[in-house]
Amino acid sequence: MYDNLQDTEIKLKNGSSDRSLRKLVLVCKPALKNITYIFDVLKNFATEIESDSDIEPGSHCPLHTFIFDCANNFLDQVNSEINRILENASLNLESWSVSTISDATSEREGSEKQILTSTLILNDNLKELQKLLSNLPDYSNHFLQLIYYVILDYKDLVHKIFKTLFDEEHYILSICWAKDRDIRRLLKSFFPTGSFCKLPNLGEMIESPEEIRLRNKEESELLIRNLHSEEHASWEIIKDNTILLILPYGPPETASQDIPEGTAELHALNAATGLKKLAKEYEDFSDVCLLALHLEVRAHCFNYLLSFDEDDASKAWETSIRSLTDDLMKMDETLVSVLTPKEMKYIFEGLGELISSILIHSVSQMTQMNEILVKRMHRGIFTVQCCLSNITMTREVSMERARQYIQLLNSTCDEVLNEIVEVGPIFKNMNMPQFSDLY
């Protein structure tokens, strides 16, 4: 019948002289999707006809058969369209470009956010499938299964893309650490929510400033200890910000958040359970991606500050500080358009504590020191403080620890001892160099 309606529409457009056709006026354009708007009404009508007729049990009236045939044909069309979208996402590079949409979660009027084009298309189709769950309740099991397999296929596709970008031939420190379950578990233990995705809202007091300082200090010490087991020449940082920009888009949160409400009440309990499991897998993947960004920023700090060329320490110091601050500013500019404020806070919070720890560790390993180098180090620390303050919009007081340490290098042994007597020990024994050897 659907094909006949299409033929009729074509004949009307072509100006057919058939009088019976000219009297026929189509209410709407013939389309299989039309069944979704009238399915329940026609089904109830067919049920009334069957109850008033002497129809044998198990048999149905022609109207019932017709509407279910239309619904089945529509299901075939939906399946084909979903397969086409997933195939296009895997083959078309434009699917992995970035689209800008309005941010409904932001309180700022007119605010926007960026999202992968493939995720946006997928999300729109998932919303359509959600509508079909209520429009065609007799097929809710089918649509729920379809939603499950769409999200599952997209998850596998995203993982494949990430493996292509971050192949194992290149030992990218942040990616390897983020995928390491032991490191991830330890870093999660420092975080109050136990998840990198469930970040506290800005202004929400979960930790005191002292607790935050201690957490950042413990994390810095863990990363420095862990780095001792790595050969510096064997690991890499992400220098191309285009690749760095891919990480925030890794977790397609929109897809995992759009799991239909009330799925537990549907008959397809296996699919509902599978969707909940997929949501957890998406959250874990989001954790890895956000943690990788967190660690990548710190890997840049290690890369530039972990060691210096002592043959020309002053020049090496200035070059390292300039390269680090340039990198941090570029990463901030790159990520601020795609991450939420609380995610940005997680990425850059605690950098001052880490940089102080790296500087103290690096300087304590040096065998030569002079007054000119000490002054340049003071200027470098101030430069880093200004850079971090511009990014975090807070005063980086944790950098004062590095400044105090550098100041000790410009003091005599008696002055150092007097400082310890008056203030108490500030640094660990391992951080105290042999001052007599440095001067």
Image (tube, rainbow, N blue to C red):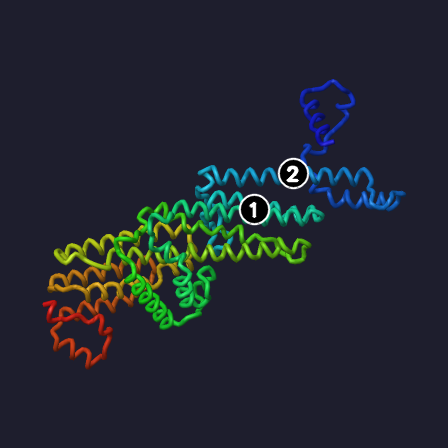
Question: Looking at the picture, does residue 151 appear above or below residue 197?
Answer: above
Q: In the rendered view, does 120 fall on the left or right side of 313?
A: right
What label sits on residue 61 in the rendered view? none
Residue 357, image quadrant: bottom left
For disc 2, the neighbor class at 10 Å (few under 14, some 14 to 19, many from 20) is few
Residue receiving disc 1 = 150
Residue 38, image quadrant: top right
For disc 1, the neighbor class at 10 Å (few under 14, some 14 to 19, many from 20) is some
Between 346 and 12, the one lying in front of the other is: 346
- Which residue is drawn at the image coordinates 63% and 50% (left, top)? 144
Instruction: Indicate the amino acid at tag 1.
Output: Val
Number of callouts:
2
Question: Looking at the picture, does residue 123 appear above or below residue 228?
Answer: above
Give the image location of residue 323, x and y in percent: 24, 52
C-alpha distance separating marks 2 and 1: 15 Å
Give the image location of residue 398, x and y in percent: 29, 67
- Kindly indicate whether the residue at mark 1 contacts the one at mark 2 (C-beta within 8 angstroms): no
Instruction: Indicate the amino acid at tag 2.
Output: Asp
Q: What element carries label 1?
A: helix
Give the image location of residue 75, x and y in percent: 66, 40
Between 91 and 1, the one lying in front of the other is: 91
Residue receiving disc 2 = 76
Direction top: furthest residue: 17
- Which residue is drawn at the image coordinates 69% and 28% (left, top)? 6
Q: In the rendered view, does 12 fall on the left or right side of 391?
A: right
Question: Looking at the picture, does residue 256 appear above or below residue 185?
Answer: above
